[in-house]
Amino acid sequence: MSSLTVVYNEISEVAGLLHKNGWAEKNAGNFSILVDLDFEINSGKHYPLPKPYTELANKVFIVTGKGKRMRDIARSPAENTVVFKINSKGDMYSILSVALVTPTSELPTHLAIHSMIAQRSSNERAVMHSHVTELIALTHIEKYCDQDRFNNMLWQMHPETIMFIPTGVGFVPFELPGSSEIATATVEALKYHSIALWEKHGVFSIASNLNDCYDLIDIIAKATKIYLMCAAVGTLPQGLSTNQLDQLKDIEF
Ligand code: 13P
Ligand code: ZN
């Protein structure tokens, strides 16, 4: 199996999960993966990037297409994603894949995140954005538009959260999708967290592969769902105690 086929298989699996969970209405959500593949440039054309990303010079990415549905990406990753290589100055890209698909409208945020990762030389290669219903719902409640309060709720709702997401999520106040402002704010949040929560919009996560990006989001979606289910029957949940959370922090995994 070629390495491109391996990546396409993972894209198919994860895009299908996002769709099945109801987190991908119409074209909602997108992702990008830094890959080691290199092959003949398909289009001789060079496309300008919104700003230079010098740390990403000569790097190759697979990115979901603008306006593409997750369910279509799951069915046919090759037709609904684009593989592109950034030039040596970091200010243009050329398309390597057969399908001439336009990269996601959230490309400024994806590239800004990959750029931050390259600067600090950490091992994340995948960036995922999704419209997770439960998380969006809570950011419509003013008191949860507070990072500490949100993280305390997440940690208290399920043991997995403190074990796998000990630094919690970074909260990003509302900004326009696709804007340079939201890219900057998201990078700031992801310097200290593996998940950034976009007020009234969705969530971004970073990890070494797409499945791990999905797991991070799945864990906090579950914790949030537990909170909302208790609230729906008229009782705010008791939550794990400080003592229980302290013990959970010490478990080696
Ligand atoms: P794209 O179709 O451009 O990826 O946009 C989806 C989205 O979720 C924007 O925030
Ligand atoms: Zn979105």
Image (cartoon, rainbow, N blue to C red):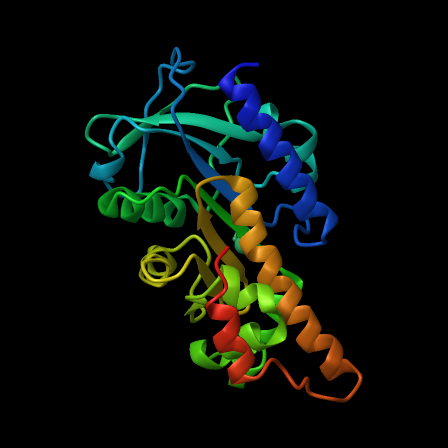
Tell me which corner region of the image, top left, top right, bottom left or bottom right, holds residue 200: bottom right
Q: Is residue 107 left or right of residue 135?
A: left
Could you say which is closer to the camera, residue 213 or residue 23? 213
Vertical side of 223 occupied by 65: above or below:
above
Q: How many marks?
A: 0
**Left or right placement of residue 99 versus residue 137 in this view:** left
165 or 34: nearer the eye? 165
Position in image of residue 50 (x %, y %): 31, 43
Say which residue appears at 20% left-offset and 37% top-offset: 54
Q: Nearer the viewer, residue 178 or 188?
A: 188
Judged from this view, the residue extending furthest toward the right is 233
Q: Is residue 139 visible?
A: no
State whether residue 54 appears in this view. yes
Q: Quadrant of the N terminus?
A: top right
In the rendered image, the vertical position of residue 14 relative to residue 233, given as above or below: above
Q: Residue 75: image x %, image y %? A: 70, 30
Residue at 51% x, 84% y is 242
Q: Residue furthest top?
A: 40
Image coordinates for residue 187, horizontal then vertical, percent: 33, 56
Q: Which residue shows up at 56% across the image and 72% down it?
A: 154
Instruction: Identify which residue is drawn at 52% across, 70% down.
Output: 248
Residue 65, position in %: x, y?
A: 53, 35
